[in-house]
Image (tube, rainbow, N blue to C red):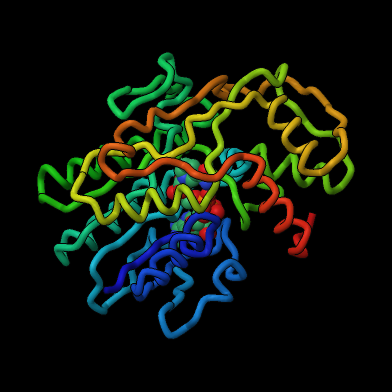
Amino acid sequence: MKVVITGAAGFLGSHLVERFIRAGYDVIGIDNLITGSSQNVAHIESSNFKFLEHNVIESIPVEEKVDGILHFASPASPIDFDKIPLEIMDVNSVGTRNCLEFARKRGIRFFMASTSEVYGDPLVHPQNEEYFGNVNPRGIRSVYDESKRFSEAMIYAYKRFYDVDVRVVRIFNTYGPRMRPDDGRVIPTFIRQAIQEKPITVFGDGKQTRSFCYVDDLIEGIFRLYHSDYSNPVNIGNPIEYTILELVQELEEVFGKSLQLDFKPLPQNDPLRRKPDITKAGDLLKWKPEIPLKEGLRKVVKWFKKTEVEY
Ligand SMILES: NC(=O)c1ccc[n+]([C@@H]2O[C@H](COP(=O)([O-])OP(=O)(O)OC[C@H]3O[C@@H](n4cnc5c(N)ncnc54)[C@H](O)[C@@H]3O)[C@@H](O)[C@H]2O)c1
C-alpha cells in the first residue's frame, strides 16, 4: 500500500507520514518547504519514504501507482495570514484541485485536512459538522478560512460530479513537537516565551477559551477516518476547553515557576471561543482524545528544550 502526503515536511504532515509508515505503508511526501522543514522528515527510513521538494500548485509529480492522496499542504498559522496570503489561497484552491484531479484520474481516495476555521467565529457551541459557520469573507483570517471553505466546496463538487472517493477532517487546534516556535499559535508562543524568560503575551483578558488536541490523538483520528467509509466532514479535536489564563497555569506547573503576563489587545476576528462536537468521530471511528493537556505540554516543552530551535 502506498499513499501520497502533501505538506509532508510540516508539523502534522510529518507525524502523519510516521503513522502511515508504522502501519506498513510506503509514503511519497511532497512539500515546497514554505513553512515546513526537511528536518521534520530527515529521520524517516528512506526504504519506505520518498521526499519530493515541489509546489503542488504546479502539479502532483507522481507517476507510480498509489492508493490514496492526503492533502496536508497549506500554511496554517495566523502569523502567515498576512505574510503569504496568496500562497495560502493558491494551495487551498489550485493545490486542492490538482490533488482531486490526481485522485479522479487514478480512481483513488482523496483526503483533505480542513479546519475548524470553516466555522469562523461561531455563534453556536459546541460546533457540530452541520453548522455552516460565521465567517468574515474579507477579514485577515479569510485568506485561510474562506480558502478552506472553497476547498470543501470543490471536494464535494468532485464527489457529486465525478464520484471521487473523498474524506474530509476538520481539525481543531492541535499542538505537539515540530510546531514552529515562532508560528504565532498560543502554545509554541507561550513555551518559547517561558524558555526565553520573557513575559507571556496574553491577548484580550485571557478569558477566551481554546481546546487543544495533542498531535498523537489527532493523527490517530485522521488515520481511522482515512480508512473509514464516511465521506462527509468529521471534526477531530479535543472538546475540553481551557481559558488562555488556565493554559498559563498549566504551563506554570510544567515549568515549575510562575510566569509573568503581558496583556495586549485582541487581534481582529480572533474567535473568542471554539469547541468541537466530536460525537460523530466517537460514533463512526470509536475515537476520542486520550492525552491530557499537562502530559502533552510536558512532551512539547521537552522537545523544545532538546531541539536546538532558533528562537
Ligand atoms: N495544526 C493545526 O492545529 C491545524 C488545525 C487545522 C487545520 N490544519 C491543517 O493541517 C494541515 C497541516 O498544517 P500544519 O499545522 O502541519 O502546518 P505546517 O505549516 O507545519 O505544514 C504545512 C506544510 O505544507 C507545505 N506547503 C504549503 N504550501 C505548499 C505548496 N504549495 N506545495 C507544497 N507544500 C506546501 C509547507 O511547507 C508545510 O511543510 C494544513 O492543511 C492546515 O490547514 C492544521
Q: Nearer the viewer, residue 220 or 127?
A: 220
Q: Residue placed farthest to the bottom in the image?
A: 47
**Residue 86 visible in the shown view:** no
Q: Position of residue 111 (x, y in %)?
A: 30, 53
Q: Is residue 205 above or below residue 40?
A: above
Q: Residue at x 53, y 29 (%)?
A: 240
Quarter of the image where one finds residue 63:
bottom left
Q: Nearer the viewer, residue 124 or 90?
A: 124
Q: Is residue 98 above or below residue 270?
A: below
Tally the numbered discs. 0
Q: Residue at x 39, y 24 (%)?
A: 127
Q: Is residue 265 left or right of residue 104?
A: right
Q: Position of residue 106 (x, y in %)?
A: 16, 67
Quarter that holds the C terminus: bottom right
Quarter that holds the N terminus: bottom left
Q: Is residue 174 left or right of residue 259?
A: left
Q: Position of residue 190 (x, y in %)?
A: 74, 39
Quarter of the image where one finds residue 134:
top left
Q: Is residue 192 above or below residue 49?
A: above
Q: Is residue 133 left or right of residue 176?
A: left
**Residue 72 visible in the shown view:** yes
Q: Residue placed farthest to the top in the image?
A: 123
Q: Residue at x 43, y 85 (%)?
A: 47
Q: Nearer the viewer, residue 112 or 54?
A: 112
Q: Is residue 272 above or below residue 142?
A: above
Q: Is residue 83 left or right of residue 3?
A: right
